Image (cartoon, helix red, strand yellow):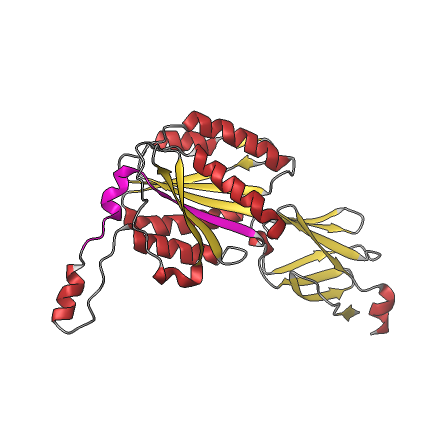
Amino acid sequence: MSDHERPVEPFSDLHVDDGHVRATLLHDPTVEGCDMAVYLDGSASMGDEYEYKKDFSGLWNWLLGKSPKVSPTNQVEPQARWILEYLATKDRNGELRVAYWACGNGREIESIGDLKGADVQDYKFPGPRNPGNSTQLEPALRDYVHYITQQVPLGARRGCAVFITDGALHDAAAVSVFCRNLAKDISSGRLPRMNFILVGVGDQVDEEQMEEICHEEYPGVGHLWCHRVAAEITQVAELVAVLVDETMTVAAGGTIYDDKGKVLKIYEARLPAILEFEVPHDAKSFTLEVNGQRYTQPLPSEAELSHH
C-alpha cells in the first residue's frame, strides 16, 4: 500500500509504503532562519587596501576602444561585494548587517547598513570615517549579538558573522570571556545558535592567537569559531565561502523522531535532499529536528492507506 500525504514545510513530497517513509525536502532547513553579517577591518593599517587607485588597465582598454573606462576601485570592494552576494544566499531575507569594526579607539563600530545581496554592484567600501588605532574584537561581537537579539522576533533562528582582520587582536582575553558567557546563553536557549568566522589577511596576523580562540570548545555548544589566514586581500572572498559552507555543515545534520519521541534516524552531516527511514506502523507523524527547530509531518493512517 502506498499513499501521498499532504506535505508540510520544509517537505515538498511525502511517500509512505508499508512503514517506509520517503520525504523530499523543499529547501535546506539547516540554514533556514539564518541571519548573517560581515564586519570589515576598520583599523588604520588597512588604509592602503581601502585607497582608491586609478585602474590604468581600464584606461588603456578605453584608449584602444575595447571597453568603457572603468571607475577607480580599491582592493576591498570586489571582495566585499563577492562575499555579500554569496552570503545573501544563506541569509533568511537576503539582507546582511555590514559594518567596519576596530574603528576610532579600536572599540568603535561604524555601521554600513543592512545591505541586500542583490544590489552588491552599487555598494562602495571606502573604509571607515575614523580608522582605528587598535584591534578590539569584543565590541564587534557584542554588536552582532545585539543585532541577532533584535532579529529573533522577526524570524532569526541562527546567526553567522564573518570578521576580517589584518592584524593581531588586542583584546583576546575579553573575547574569551565574552564567548564563554555567550555559549551559556546559547546552550540554555536564551539565544539562538551562532557561529563566527575569523579571516586574517597578510603577515601581521597572529595565527597562534586565532587558533586559541577557535579551538576552544563550550559545553552544549562545541566550537563557536573557525578561522583561516589569507596571504592577500584578493583571496578573502573564496576563503569566506569555504568556511561558511564548512560551518553550516558542521552545525547541520538532523534527527528524525516518531510521534512518541523515539529516535528513528540520525543524520550526522548535512541533510540529503531525500530522507528515507522506517516508522512504526501505528505512528501518526514523524518529526525532523534541525538546529533546535522541529518540523512535524502527519502520516496517513492505516485506514487511509488501505482506502487507496
Classify the position of the C terminus by image quarter. bottom right
Q: Is residue 52 magenta?
A: yes
Q: Considering only vertical position in the picture, is 123 above or below 5? A: above
Q: Is residue 251 magenta?
A: no
The part of the chain drawn in magenta is 34-53
The answer to whether 288 appears left or right of 200 in the picture is right
The spot of residue 158 in percent (x, y) is: 57, 47
The answer to whether 125 appears left or right of 302 in the picture is left
The spot of residue 180 in percent (x, y) is: 54, 29
Q: Quadrant of residue 121?
A: bottom left
Q: Nearer the viewer, residue 231 or 255?
A: 231
The spot of residue 106 in percent (x, y) is: 36, 33
Outermost residue to the front: 129
The answer to whether 182 appears left or right of 299 in the picture is left
Q: Nearer the viewer, residue 103 or 262?
A: 103
Q: Is residue 108 visible?
A: yes
Q: Considering only vertical position in the picture, is 227 above or below 5? A: above
Q: Is residue 220 visible?
A: no
The spot of residue 265 in percent (x, y) is: 68, 50
Q: Residue at x 29, y 47 (%)?
A: 233
